[in-house]
Amino acid sequence: MADGSTVDSGGRQTASVIITWIMAASGGLIFGYDIGISGGVTVMEPFLKTFFPSVLSKMADAKQDEYCMFDSQVLTAFTSSLYIAGLASSLVAGHITKAVGRQGVMLLGGLTFLIGAAIDAAAVNIEMLILGRLLLGVGVGFTNQAAPVYLAETAPPMWRGVITTGFQLFIAIGVVAANLTNYGTSYISAWGWRLSLGLAAVPAAVIILGALFIPDTPSSLVQRGKLDEARVALRRVRGSIADVEVELIERSVEESSKMEEGAFRRIVHCRYRPYLLIGVAIPLFQQLTGIIMIAFFSPVLFRTLGFGSNTALMSAAILGAVNLTSILSSTFVVDRYGRKLLFMLGGAQMILCQVSVAWILGAKIGFDGQATLPKGYAVAVLVLMCVFAASYGWSWGPLSWIIPSEIFPVEIRSAGQSISVAVNLGITFICIQAFLAMLCSFKYVTFIFYAAWIVVMTAFVAFFLPETKGVPLESMGELWRRHWYWGRWLVDEHKHVGTP
């Protein structure tokens, strides 16, 4: 609303409302399943024998460097190729949203992911394997762009953090499901990896069915001129007794519907620059926490530390379960204590964990990687990684999806979320492609590298991120105008002053 005030619509949480949010949040399932499945199959010997025999040969070398056992750019390309496709498709999704809405984009994402899963399960060579990964990436790019914004646009302000956290929660559920699947299929010696990759069709089917049974967001419908459908959608997500008042939404997006064309050009203007900088910084920092080691390469990391293949897969499942539990705990506090406190407390814990792991590896394996980590210390590393996963799970994990989905003004929200997701997927590609080579070159110092970044990002949040807890989406502009730093960048729409 233009004056930044809020109106209590009298809505309540009904079964229909909750089902709508669950269906939308399930868009995170395909991303989570892929995160967990790709790291697991890369330690399965039948998979390596089929596609990466050179890695198996390196593992059989009696004098191999423990840090360099899995260092293969082709192997990392199997995982990272998805994120290049996801980067490109997330930007395209911003344009498609204008035509088919957020619901339609989620449906397209699920269908594309389903096709990619089928191709990967049937792959007979590297080219076919990578093609499937690229299609999976398109699916991830579409759903990552649409689902978090869908949740933010339909959630009441006082519950927006909890509801938007649902996307990260479903990512974590997908990771745990994938890790348990990998552990089970690892006992199927010849084709277990095919089953792991093919079962990605299950979360794809979930998001397809979910997208078919939920309405589009009221804001998206109004922007496309579907006012009657917007009224119905708003009643569904606020409850039948709510005083809908669609005209309030119409006023909040009236100008944006005229400005939607050229949103990607408009977003670089001075008045939008603070939102853009935060929308880029948060997903960039999220990947520089070092979560890449947990999310994608925990089985590989645990094999490096001396765990057997099946034990490494089970350890990865334990990490995923810890992460899932911590995200559940985040839902109870994110709208009570706010975003900034969780960011900073989680950052402090992750720094301690990274430094401690670096100290253990440096003391017990050394820089040459010739020694094997003693069992007691390997367990200590597992415990520290669990604490790290928990810290990430209730701080940077869900908050990195919440913040970009809620800060952008509605007239650039699709473009802003597309850019934020593209940055997330782009930096993920770089981190994945570089991680195994970095571990081989920097050894235990890799953990110090990530710890240093967490220091930087924690300080950034403390000084530059406004607290968005409980602030209605239509009132975000006023919050940013009052900020000690960003306020100088924003142009007052009425007085046209304030540019630096």
Image (cartoon, grey):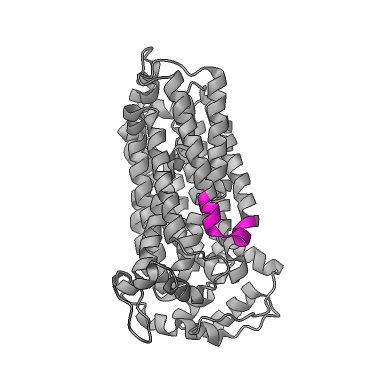
Closer-to-camera residue (143/303): 303
Closer-to-camera residue (190/278): 278
Residue in the image at 33% along x and 39% along y: 433
Report the span colored magenta: 333-344
**Is residue 236 found left or right of 38 in the rendered image?**
right
The secondary structure that most of the magenta stretch takes on is helix
Residue in the image at 35% along x and 80% along y: 259
Residue in the image at 59% along x and 35% along y: 318
Q: Is residue 6 above or below residue 131?
A: below
Closer-to-camera residue (216/71): 71
Residue in the image at 55% along x and 53% along y: 342
Give x and y (percent) for residue 242: 67, 80
Give x and y (percent) for residue 74: 31, 34
**Is residue 119 found left or right of 153 in the rendered image?**
left
**Is residue 436 found left or right of 154 in the rendered image?**
left
Give x and y (percent) for residue 447: 42, 34
Quadrant where the C terminus sits is bottom left
Give x and y (percent) for residue 26: 56, 56
